[in-house]
Amino acid sequence: MPELSKEQVFGKKGFEIAYAVFRVAANQDPAIRSVLYSHAIGVMESASALDRDSFNKHLAGLENILRIIAESGLIRQNHSQLIIAELQNLNSAMNSAILPDNPAIELGNIFTPLPKQFGNSAIRQKEPREAKISVLPKEPKQENGEPKEVKESKKNSAESNVRREAILSKIRQAGSCRLRDIQEALPDISDRTLRYDIQELMVSGEVERIGGGGPATYYRVRRDTVISVPENGPKALSSPLP
């Protein structure tokens, strides 16, 4: 028995699908029946001609209509599913059959190298790079049940509280102080840190600034701030210098 060609095999399957569609479309509304007939004939003809573009167009249209009328109860679900399955099988067979039957051509055997005096160098295929394994950053170690970052934050907060209490103590003792006086009393603290701490004390309402700026600026404890009174009685605040 002679072997059948692709056109004959696919044309026969396309005919079977078209015949099945004609059967289920016989009792449909004339408009639906006309569309089904058109796509069924298109599937049969494009399959026989190995026309993939036309086949895909009619396949999509026929599949969508079959699903719609099956969901609407106009045809049986199993009839719709059977025809769609045959369409998909034919589509898969046509896609694989269109590929060339000849063995793959080795293009590397076609080209010859240029003479060395023209700077010819062999072209090597790049070796595949090894996939880089992303390493997640390690979480900070915990000490005494707390993350390291939390512990450092608490430490810095405690140190700033000690510094600000020292600044307040100096201002209370003197009644009012210039920045230079505070710097001389606390030489181990940088000027930048002192300025920042004084600013924070003013924001919190514990210290107020007096004067127009520069050397004439003084700092004192706010009037409405509770101040501890020494045993010898309250100490008078010195008047700010002009």
Image (cartoon, grey):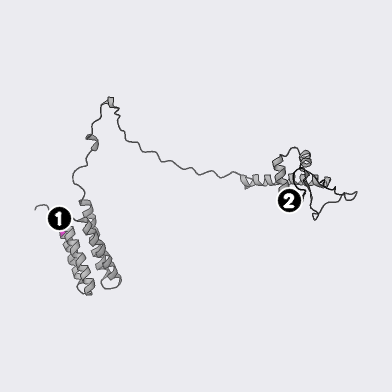
Q: Residue at 23% of width from left, 64% of height from top? A: 83
Mark 2 closeness class: few <14, some 14–19, many ≥20 residues within 10 Å: some
Crowding around mark 1 (Cα neighbors within 10 Å: few <14, some 14 to 19, many 20+) is some
Mark identifier at residue 202: 2
Q: Which of marks 1 and 2 is nearer the N terminus?
A: 1
| Magenta-highlighted residues | 4-11
User: Between marks 1 and 2, how big is the CA–CA gap?
Assistant: 92 Å
Residue 86 vs residue 45, the one in the foreground:
45
User: Is 242 or 82 nearer to us in this picture?
Assistant: 242
Please name the amino acid that badge 1 sits on.
Glu
**Rendered location of residue 1, percent (x, y):** 8, 53
**Eyeballing the image, is 107 above or below 8?**
above
Secondary structure state at the residue bearing disc 2:
helix
**Relative horizontal placement of residue 50, taking residue 201 as reference (left or right):** left
Residue situated furthest top in the rendering = 117
Label total for image: 2
Spot occupied by residue 22 in the image (x, y as percentages of width and height): 18, 69
- Please give the name of the residue rendered at 73% of the width and 49% of the height, measured from the top-left corner: 201
In the current view of this chain or complex, which residue is farthest to the right? Answer: 232
Give the residue number, with chain letter if any, for mark 1: 7
The answer to whether any part of residue 51 appears in the image is yes
* Residue 32 image position (x, y, % from top left): 23, 71
The structure residue drawn at horizontal position 21% and vertical position 59%, both measured from the top left corner, is 54
Magenta stretch: residue 9 in it? yes
Q: Does 28 sit left or right of 161 as displayed? A: left
Occupied quadrant, residue 226: bottom right
Mark 1: secondary structure = helix
Q: What residue type is labelled 2?
A: Met
What is the magenta segment's predominant secondary structure? helix
From the top left corner, tell me how far across and down residue 146 is, in percent: 63, 47
